[in-house]
Amino acid sequence: MRKLLILCVMALGIALQTAQAQTDKKAKDLLDATYKKLNSLKSLKADFTLELKGGGVNDTKKGTFYMKGPKYRVSIAGQEIISDNKTVWTIIKATNEVQVTDNNPDAQAISPAKLFTSNFYDKEYNYKYAGERKINGKVADVVALTPKNSGKGFSKVEIAIGKDKVIMGGQVWEKNGNTYRYDITNYSPNPSSVTDATFTFDPKKNPGMEVIDLR
């Protein structure tokens, strides 16, 4: 389940970040416009559905994603990952525990913090415009990204961008044959409910929860 959360962070982080394109002008124009709009926000909240296929699994889960600068919080399937850009708390409700680790934007797993790094896509991805597609009845432009580093655990990512330059969803293809498709079902820019406290874990507000410090 922790892997699911990491993949969810990866997928949504990719969906909610963009950068300068280098091989395709249409993709560059789309990503630049989306990045400019997202970068103007103080914070955001997005509800989403995540569909998992592969390895005998065909499942759909619902979750919520919050972001404020490099800080993020994702909740899905009874678990949460919270990061204030220094510390990461992984809450596992089934066992009533929270695992505490240092935030490491240079780790192999993609995180929103890493995606905020300057020229992230320029350095690690090739991407191009992949045409239009209907998502939930609305037309979206699709940008396909492929990692330059063959050591990545996934071979391709697609981002679906609405005509209003808001991310509508996308898909991740893992090399082991698994796929993860996500759809943004509700997108709220600058919600008043998102504060710095959203991105921290307070043991006093979670009495009885075991804290496992892995730092």
Image (spheres, rainbow, N blue to C red):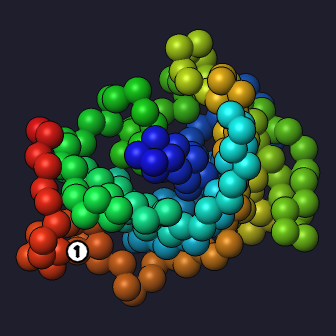
User: Residue at the spot x=90%, y=70% of the render?
Assistant: 137
44 vs 23, left or right, is left
Assign the C terminus to one quadrant of the image.
Answer: top left
In this figure, which residue is indicated by the disc labeled 1? 197
Question: As rendered, which of 121 and 106 lies closer to the eye?
Answer: 106
Q: Spot the residue most to the top.
A: 150
User: Residue at the spot x=37%, y=85% of the render?
Assistant: 193
Question: As rendered, which of 141 and 100 lies closer to the eye?
Answer: 100
Whole-percent x, y for residue 99 in the image? 21, 50
Residue 57 higher or lower than 76, as above or below? above
User: Residue at the spot x=29%, y=73% of the render?
Assistant: 198
Residue 152 higher or lower than 21, as above or below? above
Whole-percent x, y for residue 129 in the image? 82, 38
Which residue type does callout 1 highlight?
A: Ala
Q: Spot the residue most to the bottom.
A: 192
Callout 1 crowding tier (Cα within 10 Å): few <14, some 14–19, many ≥20: few
Whole-percent x, y for residue 113 in the image? 36, 45
173 vs 73, left or right, is right
Whole-percent x, y for residue 185 in the image? 68, 72
Dividing the picture into quadrants, the one containing residue 56 is: top right
70 vs 102, left or right, is right
Residue 213 visible, this angle:
yes
